[in-house]
Every structure is written in C-alpha cells, then in structure tokens.
Amino acid sequence: MTQTMESTPPTLLIVDDEPANIRLLTHVLKKEYQTDTAESGIEALEKLTTDPLPDLILLDVMRPMMDGFEVCAQLKAAPRTAEIPVIFVTAMTDIESETRALEIGAVDFITKPISPARVRARVGTHINLQLAKTALAGQNDLLREKVRERTHELELTQEITILSMATLAETRDNETGNHIHRTQHYVRILAEQMHAMGYFSDQLTEAVIEALYKSAPLHDIGKVGVPDQILKKPGSLSETEFTEMKRHTTYGRDAILVSEARMEDSDSSFLRFAREITYSHHEKWNGSGYPDGLSGEKIPLSARIMALGDVYDALISKRVYKPAFSHEKATAIILEGKGSHFDPKIVEAFKLVTHKFQAIASQFSDN
C-alpha cells in the first residue's frame, strides 16, 4: 500500500453500475488520486485478486447480480482485502441502509447526488487515516523487532553472567572441569523426559524447563564461601570440615536471596529455581540429606532433578578420593538409589535416557 502521498498518489477503486457515475467520481478525484473502475461487484472482486490493491474503495449499492452490501461483506471476510477502507456512494438515503453498510465494515456513507467537495474531503480523511494506520503498523513491527532483539540480548547477557559466575566458582575446585555444562544438560533431558511421561507435566512446562536449564549451573555457586584448605583438600574431610563444606548450600542460597530482594516487582521465577537448586540439591528422598533433612516431595522438584544429575556426574568423574566410574556402574548406583536417595519417578525417567546422559558426558568430557 502507498506510504506517502508525495511519492505515488493513492489508488482508488470506483465501483458503480452506471458509467456516468464512474465518470463523475473519476473527474472529481483524478487530480489527487489514481483511479481504477469496475461496473459490477463481480468485476471488482476479480480486480482485487491481483496486486497492487487499492488504498480505498468507493462502492455503490448495485443490483441485480451482486449488491454493494454483499461485495463489502466479502471484502471484509477475506484477509487479503479486509483492511481496505470502503466508502458507500449511493442514492439510498434511508437510515437502515446506512446502518447496514457501517455494520458490515464500511467506514463511511455518502449519498447521491454527490457534492464534489464533500467527496474529496471524505476520501482524503479516510486515505490519511489508512496511511497513518499503515505507518503505525510498520512502527509497531519495528518496535516488536527491537523488543525481540533487546530480549534476546538480555537473555544472552543473563546466560553469560550465570556461566561466568558458575565457572568462577568452579575454578576454585579444579577437579570439576565441564561439570556445570554436563549437569545443566542432564537436568534438561530429565525434565523433558518426565514431561513426556506425564510426571509433573503441569509444573514442567517448556518455560520452566528452560529456566531449570539456565539456572542449573549455579547449583554450587556457594562454594565461593568455602575456605580453600577445605575445598581443595586432597584427602578426606574431617567431621568439622565436612560440616563447613555443607554450608556451601546456605552460602549459595543467601547470595541468590539478595538478588531476589532487588527484584520484588519482577518475574523472579528463574532466581527461585536457582535458589531451590542451590540450597536443596543435596537433600535425599528418604530425608537423610542436607541442609534441612527434607524428604519426599517436600524437596523442591527442581532440586530433586538436580540431585540425580549432580550425583551421576560425580560418579563418572575422577576425584582425589575415587577413580571415575563407568557409565554402567554409575547408572547401576543411580538405580539402586531409587526411593532412598532419589525421587522414584525421576529415576524412572532416567532409565529411559541413560544413553543421552552418556552422550552428554562424552560431548563435554574433561579430556
């Protein structure tokens, strides 16, 4: 559709079964607009099947084959032509006809005999409105694109910040390598499989799964608060040292709580999952975990999923206190922990995606 009246004049389609009426309207409007004509509703509809479309249609209430009301109704029912403004120009002067025309989508109703000044004014008004509407739609499209770009930029910045923070924490524990990358993929695979099986599908929506995936790298962020002599100790920890090590769950939660407090008026679901995972991923299904000894579904679902992925990765990874276990042995240990360490439903999902876990471990191998 024409964007400016200065470049190419807007185009009008004049539809009337009387050639004299067409000639009159063409004469009145030809100085300001390009005009095309049709002498029947059928001819008009045929013209509108090809480009370019007119910017406005002047329509008479014609008879007998197809009247203007039917033509207008068909125009408004078709997505291709629905936005073209239609002005009825007719000898019918009754209020019922005018009301009907407006109800089926016409923007105006001009009675014959026409006043040239009135026709030019009415047409000019609706052309300007249409041009403004088109310009506004273009601006809205531009704004939507800018919002999408900005949202993508913010999401990317968020992801980079998360990974940077998580990687910084992991550099203090040089045995973990690609642990944060592997575990976030385990979390996504498990959550998707559980959703497919109908487990917690009301909670594990696509948006939630994406939030879990993005927040998973923060599960050990609290390690930044653990002293180096404990975190990097090559041997077994004493009871006192292990008590301090367990505090990394609290350190991580408290750090995220500070961030949540600054986002009171925002959607902080992402931070909620990060807090749940950070604080509760060492809880066990039977209540023997830490820091709170929670059991069963009292443990947040996000943390229960993280727990399985975290343990699997610890099992297949070399540590100062143990060699790296094979995928088969790690899988067997996970299955043995069903109903004690791990949520039984999550273990059932794990059984169906063990091959995907193995592939992730290979793709993000520390070697």
Image: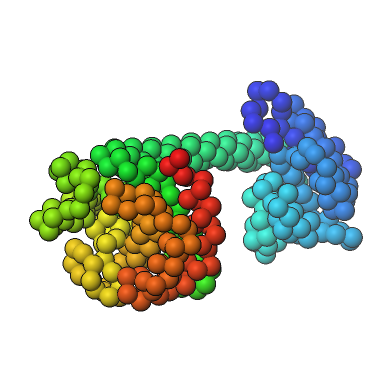
What residue is drawn where x is 27% and y is 62%?
282
Location of residue 21 by image quarter: top right
Q: Name which quarter of the figure residue 53 lies in.
A: top right
Is 91 positioned to the left or the right of 192 in the image?
right
Instruction: Tally the marks.
Output: 0
Location of residue 121 in the rendering, given as x and y in whole percent from the top left corner = 63, 37
Does residue 227 appear in the picture of this structure?
yes
Q: How is the image coloured?
A: rainbow
Give 118 or 37, whichever is nearer the viewer: 37
Left or right of residue 140, residue 254 in this image: left
Name which residue lies at 15% across and 42% down: 229
Left or right, 365 with reference to 109? left
Q: Residue shown at 27%/42% (left/top)?
A: 173
Q: Quadrant of the C terminus?
A: top left
Instruction: Give the farthest residue toward the left.
Output: 240
* Residue at screen point 68% across, 23% down: 7
Please provide percent x and percent y for residue 12: 75, 38
Q: Is residue 352 above or below residue 144?
A: below
- Percent x, y of residue 29: 75, 33
In the image, residue 260 sits, relative to residue 342, either above or below, namely above
Quadrant that contains the N terminus: top right
Q: Quadrant of residue 170?
A: top left
Residue closest to the eye, 252 or 355 = 355
Let me know if residue 91 appears in the view: no
| Spot occupied by residue 30 in the image (x, y as percentages of width and height) | 77, 30
